[in-house]
Structure formats: C-alpha cells, structure tokens
Image (cartoon, rainbow, N blue to C red):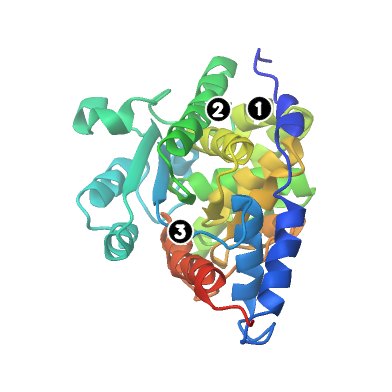
C-alpha cells in the first residue's frame, strides 16, 4: 500500500532497560519505607527508572500535553452527543484555556500542543502551528467509505512520527496524550473490535459525552458496518487505519511508535489512544512497555484494548470527558512516583 515500511519498528523499538529496573528495585529495598507500602507508586518508580535508563530516577521536569484533533464523517449518523464537524469548537476551547484539559494542564504548569490532522473547518480559523500537519478536512464515513486514501494515511502516519521527533528533540521527558474529535470513539471501537475479533455490541460505549439509547444503537450499527470493511485488511495496519481509522488516529499511531523508538514515555488517555496503542502493538510488540494507561474511561472498547496490551489504568474516577483529561489526572501520580524514587533516602 505504501513506501512506508512499518516492519522496521519491530527492529527499532527496544524494551526499557530491565537491568536498570532491577537496580531501581534493589535501591527501593534499601529505603526506610518498606517495599509495597507505596503501592503502585513503587511500580511506577521502577518503570520510570527503566524508561529513563538511570537510577536514581530523574524528576519529570518537561512533560507535554499533546492532543491530536480530527473530525470523522461517521458522526453524520448521529453517533455522538456532539454535532458532526464540531471538533473545531473543541480545539478553540483548548486554545482559549476553557476546556477541562486546558484547566488541568494550566494548574500543573504543563504546556499543551494541539495538532489538527483533519478538523472540518477552514484552516484559516485556527493558528498555523495547529494546522500545519493537516492532511484533509474531515475523515471519510467509515461505514461506507475509507477514512483516508493511501497517500493521506502515509502522510498522517509520518506527521505523527515527525511530531514525536520534535518533542524528543525539544527535551520532552513525558507525553500526556489525548485527542479532540467528534466520532473518534466510533472509529476507535471499530479498530478494537477488528483487532480483538469481537462484535460491535461488545465494544460500543456511550462516548465522552454520554449518548442516549437510540444514539448508542446507531453507533453500534455504524461499527458493525465498518467492521465488515475492516476485516479484509487486518493484515496491513496502515491500510486498516486508512480504511476505518482516520487522520488523527493514524497520526497518533505513528506518534506512539516513534516515541517508543525515541525512548519517550507516554501516558495514554481514553479509548482513542487505547485503540491506536493496540494497532501500534500489532506493529511492534515491545512498544507498550513505553506507555502507561492514565485512567479507565468506562468505555468497553478501552478496557478490551488495555487488557490485550496488558496495561492497567492508574486511575478510575468515572471521568468520561476525554480530550486528555484522564491522562492529565494521572500525571501527578507519575510525578509523585518519580519524586519519591529520586528523593527518598536509602539506609546506610
């Protein structure tokens, strides 16, 4: 389908340093606070040591919130509580500091970057630094047509890779990943159902803004129809993303894989980032070792994807807002684990 060879990632991505993790665990055993007393913070501290490749762990000093944005044609079927083509409003809310993610990021002192991959608005309505990677205006209606052409899928995937390189080169030491989309959870549910071999009803959730029963039935039917189109292309992950993903999901997948190449850890947010993580795992089985799941969103598709890639969410507060909110809520926990691993004294 493309000159882009995804098989290269399986060779390029290595696991975080297991020897360093053992060193971190040995150091942890010498602290006055007994092992296990800090619960998952101990586990996070060991993971941070491995992904950083050092003991003691460095504090997380340059995190970055990264939100990939795109509209999905399938939203025209009434599968979302938000209006079809409404992602531009979500982007503007983040840029104006008026979204939940923007408020949390501001409180945490973390910069936010929004990347428009397929927002359905005139690009002149948004800042150039937001739109410069856009590949099209809205992704196709996946129940009846491909989300992207082959060329658009490659461009979106390469954009995600380029953004991962930009963030790594800028010194980012942890990415808080999220998405801004209308219809994105329908595309994500389709990808997860296809890759896990399940039916539409098993993965269809209520979305970030919960939908009523009739909308849920429409969403389930859309995923069922999109699944028929997805199953014949399961052997080619880029073609799968072009068929039933979308520009934003394709870019996120490229971003996750290249971040693992660059040894940049990532906190995943909701069902969209979980779907992209599942696709990325199919490309390179070591890649999930570079990620943690921020929060259980309540979406059945997210739970299925995270179970498949063996990631256990750090939090479960019933937050369904999406847009990076769940991942941001987990950021203080990761920072706390780093601080404790770095600063707690070791017994003489």
The one of 12 and 279 positioned closer to us in this rendering: 12
Within 10 Å of disc 3 (Cα), the crowding (few <14, some 14-19, many 20+) is some
| Lower position in the chain sequence, tag 3 or tag 2 | 3
Q: Which mark is residue 238?
A: 1
Residue at the disc numbered 3: 60
Query: Which of labels 3 and 2 is toward the front?
Result: 3
Kind of element beneath mark 1: helix
- Which residue occupies 53% across, 77% down? 344
Quadrant of the drawing holding the N terminus: top right
Q: Examine the rendered structure and indicate whether residue 158 appears above or below residue 180.
A: above
Query: Outermost residue toward the top?
Result: 3
Q: Percent x, y for residue 82?
A: 36, 52
- Which residue occupies 32% across, 59% down? 105
Q: Percent x, y for residue 122?
A: 25, 27
Kind of element beneath mark 3: loop
| Lower position in the chain sequence, tag 2 or tag 1 | 2
Q: Examine the rendered structure and indicate whether residue 76 appears above or below residue 342.
A: above
Count of numbered badges drawn on the protein? 3
The one of 216 and 310 positioned closer to us in this rendering: 310
- Which residue occupies 57% across, 43% down? 187
Q: CA distance from mark 1 to mark 3?
A: 33 Å
Q: Is residue 290 visible?
A: yes
Q: Percent x, y for residue 248?
A: 48, 36
Query: Outermost residue toward the front?
Result: 348
Q: CA distance from mark 2 to mark 1?
A: 8 Å
Mark 1 touches mark 3? (CB < 8 Å): no
């Amino acid at each position: 389908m493309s000159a882009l060879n995804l098989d290269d990632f399986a060779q390029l991505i290595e696991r975080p340093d297991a020897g360093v993790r053992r060193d971190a665990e040995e150091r942890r055993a010498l602290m006055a606070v007994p092992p296990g007393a800090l619960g998952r913070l101990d586990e996070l501290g060991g993971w941070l040591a491995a992904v950083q490749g050092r003991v003691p762990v460095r504090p997380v000093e340059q995190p970055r919130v990264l939100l990939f944005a795109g509209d999905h044609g399938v939203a025209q079927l009434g599968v979302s509580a938000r209006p079809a083509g409404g992602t531009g409003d979500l982007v503007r809310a983040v840029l104006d500091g008026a979204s939940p993610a923007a408020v949390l990021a501001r409180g945490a002192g973390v910069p936010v970057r929004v990347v428009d991959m397929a927002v359905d608005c005139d690009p002149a309505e948004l800042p150039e630094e937001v739109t410069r990677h856009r590949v099209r205006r809205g992704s196709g209606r996946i129940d009846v047509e491909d989300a992207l052409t082959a060329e658009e899928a490659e461009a979106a995937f390469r954009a995600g890779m380029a953004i991962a390189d930009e963030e790594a080169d800028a010194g980012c030491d942890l990415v808080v990943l999220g998405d801004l989309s209308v219809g994105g959870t329908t595309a994500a549910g389709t990808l997860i159902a296809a890759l896990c071999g399940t039916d539409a009803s098993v993965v269809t959730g209520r979305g970030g803004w919960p939908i009523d029963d009739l909308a849920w039935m429409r969403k389930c039917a859309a995923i069922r129809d999109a699944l028929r189109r997805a199953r014949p292309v399961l052997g080619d992950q880029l073609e799968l993303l072009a068929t039933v993903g979308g520009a934003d999901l394709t870019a996120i997948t490229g971003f996750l894989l290249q971040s693992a190449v660059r040894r940049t850890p990532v906190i995943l947010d909701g069902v969209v980032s979980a779907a992209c993580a599942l696709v990325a795992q199919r490309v390179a089985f070591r890649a999930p070792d570079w990620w943690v799941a921020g929060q259980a969103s309540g979406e059945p598709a997210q739970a299925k994807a995270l179970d498949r890639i063996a990631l256990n969410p750090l939090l479960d507060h019933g937050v369904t807002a999406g847009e990076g909110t769940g991942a941001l809520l987990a950021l203080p926990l990761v920072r706390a684990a780093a601080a404790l691993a770095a600063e707690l004294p070791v017994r003489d």
